[in-house]
Amino acid sequence: ASVAGTAGATRRLAEGLKQISDTICPAGRSLGELFQELVLSKDLSEDLRLVTELLVAWREIGEAQVSLSTRLAEVATTLEEEAKKGEQVRSQRLEEATKLIQSLDAPPAAAAPQGGGWFSFFG
């Protein structure tokens, strides 16, 4: 039961990460595209340079969001694969346990008489 609970929690975590990734990626792309043309230059006035620095920082935040989104999606995929492997191993172990229990519950097979021993000479 513990493996099943862990696999379920892992799947829920993977789904959550995927949702976060799907949410932040478009915003990051928009920020990156919106301020794509901005370049810091020494030729700008002090006020314009401060505004440009702020907007460039927002562009970088957008780029970071896209990068984070990509990584979250990768982690979510890995978690889903690991949860699936865990469930497969659990199923296999349950089948093995069932077969073992059945073999222990079954009456032992009658032992076939084997030739040899001391009395075989007389028989």
Image (cartoon, rainbow, N blue to C red):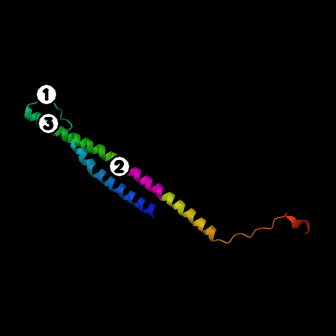
The residue to which callout 3 is attached is 52
Q: How many marks?
A: 3
Tell which circle, 2 or 3, labels the residue nearer the N-terminal end: 3
The residue to which callout 2 is attached is 73
**The residue stretch that appears in magenta:** 75-86
Closer to us: 9 or 15: 9
Give the image quarter of residue 60.
top left
Mark 1 lies on a secondary structure that is loop
Q: Which residue ends up furthest to the front in the rendered image?
A: 118
Closer to us: 5 or 69: 5
Closer to us: 82 or 123: 123
Give the image quarter of residue 57.
top left
The residue to which callout 1 is attached is 42
Image position of 37 (left or right of 88): left
Image position of 54 (left or right of 63): left
Q: What type is the residue that disc 3 sits on? A: Thr
Q: What type is the residue that disc 2 sits on? A: Ala
Q: What type is the residue that disc 1 sits on? A: Lys
Tell which circle, 1 or 2, labels the residue nearer the N-terminal end: 1
